[in-house]
Amino acid sequence: CWVGSRGLITAPLPQASPLARSFELDYEEDCFRKDGAPFRYISGSIHYARVPRPAWRDRLLKMYMSGLSAVQLGLLVILRPGPYICAEWEMGGLPSWLLWKPDIVLRSSDPAYLAAVDSWLHVLLPKIKPRLYQHGGNIISVQVENEYGSYYACDYGYLRHLLGSFRALLGSEVLLFTTDGTQPEELHCGTLQGLYATIDFGPGSNVTEAFGAQRWVEPKGPLVNSEYYTGWLDYWGEAHASTSSVRVARGLENMLQMGASVNMYMFHGGTNFAYWSGADFKDQYKPVTTSYDYDAPLSEAGDPTEKLFAIRTVISKFQPLPAGPMPSPTPKYAYGRVALQKHADLLDALGVLCPSGPIQSQFPLTFEAIKQAHGFVVYRTQLPRDVPDPATLGAPPHSICDRGYVMLQKYCGTLERDGQTTLRVMGRAGDTLDVLLENMGRISFGANISDFKGLLGNLSLDSSPLSNWLIYPLDIDTAVQQGWPHAALPKPSRRGRAGPAFYTGTFETPGIAWDTFVKFPGWSKGQLWINGFNLGRYWPRRGPQQTLFVPGSVLHIGRPNNVTVLELEGAPSTPLLFFLDQPLFNRTATGTLHNASSGCRKEQRWL
């Protein structure tokens, strides 16, 4: 199996002599050799960070029973420790604090970046070395970087530095490899002598042509597809991705008939809890949904699908399957309707959410400049003059990263990256203007992963720049984990249901703590916590995802479960949640995909 930041992959492990453990390339016979015998793995990815820890054993057992199993000695591991992993994870797995140095060049020979990488590898890899297969462990190979050929830098010095570090810290015997797409430019920039080059492609590719691309850089050695795509990720505002079981199974069988080793990406996708979903940039910013179901063989909740059984049938043609039945799906429960009540407008809770107080600045500062990794920041200033007639509140292009919820006495509307960047507003001199900025996830793939967040440029009023800002970095999660807002008295509000506000409620389970899915009827967009656990972003107005997965492990038995919702745009007139026993994925938004309102004027009435 494959573990690491990028994933875990199970593969068959026949019995071996403990006195002669080896895993190596055979360039004469075009195969791997484990303990001297020809070896081929059939494997599948699982990202441990996307799966609640109590569910790890269940998911791995189901992978084992699919035929990706270890036979006697336990799971084999192909480790992919980064430092960059992509995986549609926030900033591709790189820590956001790297951007505290604004001119850093990520994934390059930039000394500042290499210093951070070396610091990471010198902690991680010494822990890995005793777990290598050659030393009695189960790690058979280690990937260096990830799809580097798709990155603009094409910095061989960087790859050589990584190769030297991995060799120095892991030794000369471990098999090191790379993974890249099949285009010549990807293989040209992503491969390096001393690192075995593998490729990735999905069921839509011609298998012979794809492996021909690998043979262009590796004329001899085993054929390896390190990421065979069983499905695809979802973006907010697009249809739920799906790939037919028949196509996935056919492509797998074709590769196995050629003797290739294959890792299926993903075998179990899981969930982007909290703020960890990343984003792509394809002509525009495309944030990834909270669900990472991926249309994978194991569903987001870890249940076997039709696709899993189709894959299992193919594997059975090439190697024996484990004895016994496939484990049943985990039990689900529809806990039903939960009523919520408004607790407080977000702006009335700044003392709790930002206990250190605001940062003063003439002009807006980015999240990175104030060392805010994730979540939300409030930018506050005052109108410098009376605005009796509607004026344009605007932002420079590409300066809203990623959504800004504007309030001027009342909620005015939303500014959005690659979307609406102006609103019409009115007010009096001295009126407080607040903009709540939301980080929707840093770009995880492509050239521009230096994805700074917040207000990257100044807002202007009819082209006159606004100044004298108070900046509040919010630590909502700490407050919620410490019992707020359930332990506090509700704050009366005159703002109605529009704009950023917290809602609370409780429910009890009937003596069980089973997985469930929560639906948001009439809600707009926001964040959900249950018992202090951040389940991620909901956005039913944009879709396609309509429910959030709630692992049973976060629920209480015999005492109330505390539900906290941060609604960002506008709650329904009757704030309810529904807990279901199945997910709703594939429903795209109807009507506008952008704002619930188009301005902030005195005559507006909020329904």
Image (cartoon, helix red, strand yellow):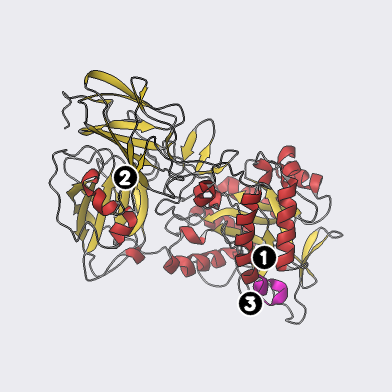
Circles 1 and 2 in contact, beta carbons < 8 Å: no
Residue 132 drawn above or below residue 362: below
Q: Residue at x 56, y 63 (%)?
A: 66
Q: Whole-Å distance between the Cαs marked 3 and 1?
A: 15 Å
**Kind of residue at badge 2:** Gly
The magenta region covers 129-136
**Quadrant in the picture for residue 364:** top left
Whole-percent x, y for residue 69 in the image: 60, 68
Mark closer to the chain start, 2 or 3: 3
Q: Is residue 458 visible?
A: yes
The numbered dot on residue 275 is: none
**Quadrant in the picture for residue 54:** bottom left
Which residue was labeled with disc 3? 72
Which of labels 1 and 2 is toward the front?
Answer: 2
Secondary element at tag 3: loop
Q: Residue at x 80, y 71 (%)?
A: 36
The numbered dot on residue 526 is: 2
> 73 or 258, which is in the foreground?
73
Quadrant of the image for the C terminus? top left
> 599 or 59, which is in the foreground?
599
Q: Whole-Å distance between the Cαs marked 2 and 3?
A: 47 Å
Local crowd size for mark 3, using a 10 Å CA cut-off: few (<14), some (14–19), many (≥20): few
Relative horizontal placement of residue 345, taking residue 400 as reference (left or right): left
Whole-percent x, y for residue 450 in the image: 55, 42
**Quadrant in the picture for residue 449:** top right
> Does 287 lie within the magenta span?
no
The numbered dot on residue 319 is: 1
> 245 or 427, which is in the foreground?
427
Whole-percent x, y for residue 333 in the image: 30, 60
**Kind of residue at badge 3:** Gln
